[in-house]
Amino acid sequence: MRDTLVNLWRDCREDWSFVTSRLAQAFREARQLHSRERREVAETLYGMVRRARALDFALAGAGVETPPEGTRRSASRAYVDLLAYRVLYEGMAARAAASERPDVPWDRVEAALASVSEEPDALTRFGLEHSFPDWIATRLLAERPDDAGALAASLNERAPLTVRANRLKNTREQLATRLRLEGVETEPTRFSSDGLHLLTRVNVFGLGAFRDGLFEVQDEASQLAAELVAPAKRGLVVDACAGAGGKTLALGALMASKGRLLAMDVSPKKLDELGRRARRAGLSNHRWEVVDAEGPLPPSVARLRGKADRVLVDAPCSGVGSMRRNPEARWRMAPEFIDALPATQLAIALRAAPLVAPGGRLIYATCTVFEAENEAVVRRILEAEPDFERVPVKEILGKARAEELATRDGFALAPLPHLHGMDGFYATVLRRRKPA
């Protein structure tokens, strides 16, 4: 298990690729690891990725040289990183680490991390305390001065494992019963109508209930975004950035597999995955189209201009709100990439907007907390498409849920992990006015 962790960490530090993909490949190769060991490997690796900046700082403070970013660390140095994480975040005694690596002054490692609280520069202190790069720390502090620390701390926690009961095959209550028979305890999500939090640590993809299509793994915030779309059962719904289809499947279930559901994406591979998932879920009212990243929509989609009851634009974004699940993103992304996103998001929304029928709705959504990708983009959509108007969240989700989850003006769904226990998310509804 130690060798698996060391090699995974070396791979991660070399290019910060997706941890989930790294783990899947490692577990295929290390079949001797038991389920408990796999959980420990995964949790430790995720923790090390989250705390990479703090680990480097503590070791550097103790005189341990930091390898250049983007280079492959030696197995010896990677093991020192692992021991440092165990000492600083898992309660391993310094003397136990010293028995493994007596060449490292572990008391100085602990002292270096403790000194962060005395750092005079607020930005540096925040970045080290929460192990975020300065450019993300700067934006969090600027946009959320009152709760940036609480938000950053929550993004370093392990996310709950949440599933959505597939309405096409069972109810949430029936799913809970089935899962209990498979040894999995659950509790209902607080806000979404079909969600269950799994309380038992288990490989969900090995469950019979999953193979039978009774549920999909989906965060509660993502489930709520599908509910905010509120698709008409016999209408035409377009998922303009479908990806592998998580929200497409949720929309199809809400439609009871009736009406028409079109999923679009630039990736044929992701749409193929959507097809496999749809077959397992029993969804039959959907079709999908591969579209170019830029330029006009294909004729088969363009002919739907002015006919769609709902168009969901779940735009590509920085993903800051979901960093509990993808902690490596904080190290992989560059501020220049984030700065370029709003233009892309606007272009996607404006390309999809003409599909919306009079009285229909355009739903713009992201899994980020940054204003530049959310409200700022919506303002530009409304400037370019003045026949759209905003719809209060309470008109769709009801007053009770809107009071807890909506922005202060009531026009956007904006749950946060430290307040609501789900991913940071943003979604708002724009309705095309009917001709007078």
Image (cartoon, grey):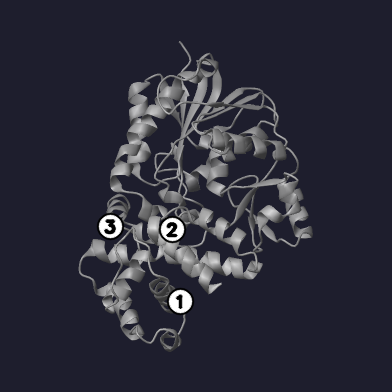
Position of residue 186 measured from the top left corner of the image (x, y, whole percent): 68, 58
Q: Which mark is residue 285?
A: none
Residue on which disc 1 sits: 86
Residue in front for this viewpoint, 377 or 411: 377
Figure quadrant of the C terminus: top left
Query: On the rendered structure, is 379 left or right of 262?
Result: left
Alpha-carbon distance for marks 3 and 1?
A: 25 Å
From this view, report whether residue 35 is shown above or below residue 256.
below
Residue on which disc 2 sits: 155
From this view, report whether residue 387 is shown above or below residue 121.
above
Amino acid type shown at disc 2: Leu
Furthest residue in direction right, as rendered: 181
Q: Residue at x 57, y 56 (%)?
A: 24
How packed is label 1: few (under 14 Cα within 10 Å), some, or many (20 or more)? Answer: some
Amino acid type shown at disc 3: Asp
Query: On the rendered structure, is 428 left or right of 308?
Result: left
Residue 277, quarter of picture: top right
Q: Earlier in the sequence, mark 1 or mark 2?
A: 1
* Viewer-nearest of discs 3 and 1: 1
**Element on which disc 2 rests:** helix
Residue in front for this viewpoint, 276 or 129: 276
Amino acid type shown at disc 1: Arg
Residue on which disc 3 sits: 134
* Viewer-nearest of discs 3 and 2: 3
Furthest residue in direction top, as rendered: 436
* Viewer-nearest of discs 1 and 2: 1
Alpha-carbon distance for marks 1 and 2?
A: 20 Å
Position of residue 232 measured from the top left corner of the image (x, y, whole percent): 62, 26
Q: Residue at x 27, y 54 (%)?
A: 138
How packed is label 3: few (under 14 Cα within 10 Å), some, or many (20 or more)? Answer: some
**Element on which disc 1 rests:** helix
